[in-house]
Image (cartoon, rainbow, N blue to C red):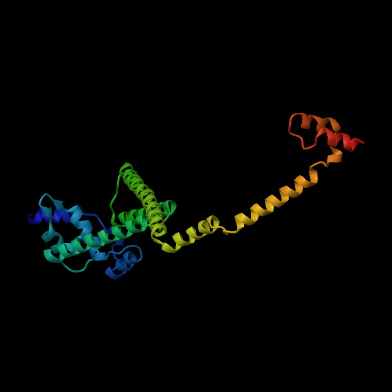
Amino acid sequence: MDDSTIRLEINKYKKFKKVDGATYRKVNQFLRKRTYITAREWALARLCTDFRTSGGAEMTFIGKHLPELVPFMEDTYTPQAVNQARNSFKKKVRKASATFFYGAMCGFFTTDELDDLLFEASEVSRFLLEVEGTTLDIDEEIDIEDRITKVMRSVGEAAKTILKTRAEEITLQQHSLDPASEKSESIPETNLTQSDPLSGTKETILQEKVQQESATKHSPSPDEIPSATIREMDHHGTGCLSDNNYERENQ
């Protein structure tokens, strides 16, 4: 780019005007309270996005005119330093994303807590965009938030299902591999099936004795048996008294 084009681009760039007059240190403290990135990484990530071309970001242009583009940046940067800050920003975002997704998938946060985290993160991001002077269309902003919320809800539900299934499998494995539990379960069954070898004999003797006493108690004596019954029993050959005995008894 020639000098006139460069000057036009610099004058046209209106980002970070809300922090005009703030020192690098104060901006850095402001970011450290809310994010993991530094003021240098924040400024250069924004510039690399705004001055992106088909061949990549204009590293030389950004580094050479950095103090003119961003009010709180005091020194110029080499293309290598710009690229280093850009890569540092990428790594921090990746680590923060992995940390967040781990917290969502390990079951530490409930679905409602994940919603709260997303809301808080979106508020901080929206505030940073406002401070740096970047505006998003309201429909585009809502669409981005809805898509992120939908993804995180599905991640939370899937993580809950996975953890529940994993816990059940671990419980089954421990139950099947624990010899103490198998032994403790088999002991009551053995005790229930084992019996005293003499208990059956004792019970049989007692039952026979009870039956004999019951039969003796309830069987009628010869004096109590009616005469007709005696004659009938003797006539059929089933009785134990003859007619002579009967006549003798009646005499």
Q: Quadrant of residue 85?
A: bottom left
The quarter of the image holding the C terminus is top right
The answer to whether residue 237 of the structure is visible from this angle is yes
Q: Is residue 195 left or right of residue 79?
A: right
Residue 71 in the image: x percent, y percent? 24, 63
Comparing 62 with 10, the one in front is 62
The quarter of the image holding the N terminus is bottom left
Residue 44 in the image: x percent, y percent? 21, 61
**Vertical placement of 240 versus 133: above or below?**
above
The residue lying furthest to the bottom in this view is 25
x 32%, y 45%: residue: 147
The residue lying furthest to the front in this view is 244
x 36%, y 51%: residue: 162
**Vertical placement of 130 versus 180: above or below?**
above
The answer to whether residue 70 of the structure is visible from this angle is no
Residue 157 in the image: x percent, y percent? 38, 48
Count of picture labels: 0
x 12%, y 65%: residue: 80
Q: Is residue 10 left or right of residue 152?
A: left
**Vertical placement of 65 versus 205: above or below?**
below
Q: Quadrant of residue 40?
A: bottom left
Comparing 226 with 112, the one in front is 226
Residue 119 in the image: x percent, y percent? 39, 52
